[in-house]
Image (spheres, helix red, strand yellow):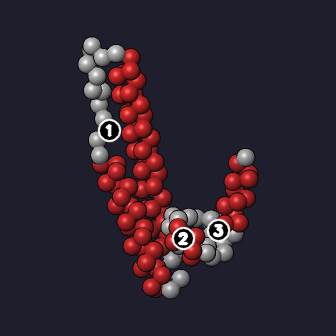
Amino acid sequence: MDPAASLRFKVLLERERDRAKAQISRPLPTAMTSPQADALDCAADLSLWTVAQATYLVARRRLAEAEVALARLKAGIYGICQSCSREIDPARLEILPTATLCVECQKKAEKAQS
């Protein structure tokens, strides 16, 4: 990968990492219903908390993926498929900078999970 592309992907990955960190740093909502709350209020609070928890977990995964990709970039192996060792299409990395598999290997991995 040429130095200009490496720099561009480094910036993309750092932005992704920073967005994930910002999302993780937000506090999870606490129960806001009073003892007099009805079932709908309790359900709404539970729904909000569930969405916030899921968002938090996704952000943690995105942060880990961005950090791994940045480490691979630093090691000089970013953009190389972890399965077949071929170069990952730069267009794929533009869309999904944390990709570790080329399109073909990703398809195979998804089929194997089905």
For residue 108, which numbered disc appears in the image?
none
Residue 52 in the image, given as x and y percentages of width and height = 38, 39
Question: For the residues marked 1 and 3, what is the alpha-carbon distance in whole angstroms?
Answer: 36 Å
Q: Give the vertical position of 56 relative to 100 (above or below).
A: above
Q: Residues within 10 Å of mark 1 (few under 14, many from 20)?
A: some
- According to the picture, the residue beneath numbered tag 1 turns out to be 28
- Seen at 40% across and 24% down, the residue is 43
Q: Amino acid at mark 3?
A: Cys
Q: Which circle's residue, 1 or 3, is located before the other in the chain?
A: 1
Q: Which circle's residue, 3 or 2, is located before the other in the chain?
A: 2
Q: Residues within 10 Å of mark 3 (few under 14, many from 20)?
A: many
Question: For the residues marked 3 and 2, what is the alpha-carbon distance in whole angstroms?
Answer: 9 Å
For residue 102, which numbered disc appears in the image?
3
Q: Amino acid at mark 1?
A: Leu
Q: Amino acid at mark 2?
A: Leu
For residue 93, which numbered disc appears in the image?
2
Residues tagged 1 and 3 counted as in contact (Cβ below 8 A): no
Residue 87: name its quadrant: bottom right
Give the camera-side residue of 44 and 72.
44
Horizontal relation, residue 87 to residue 9: left or right: right
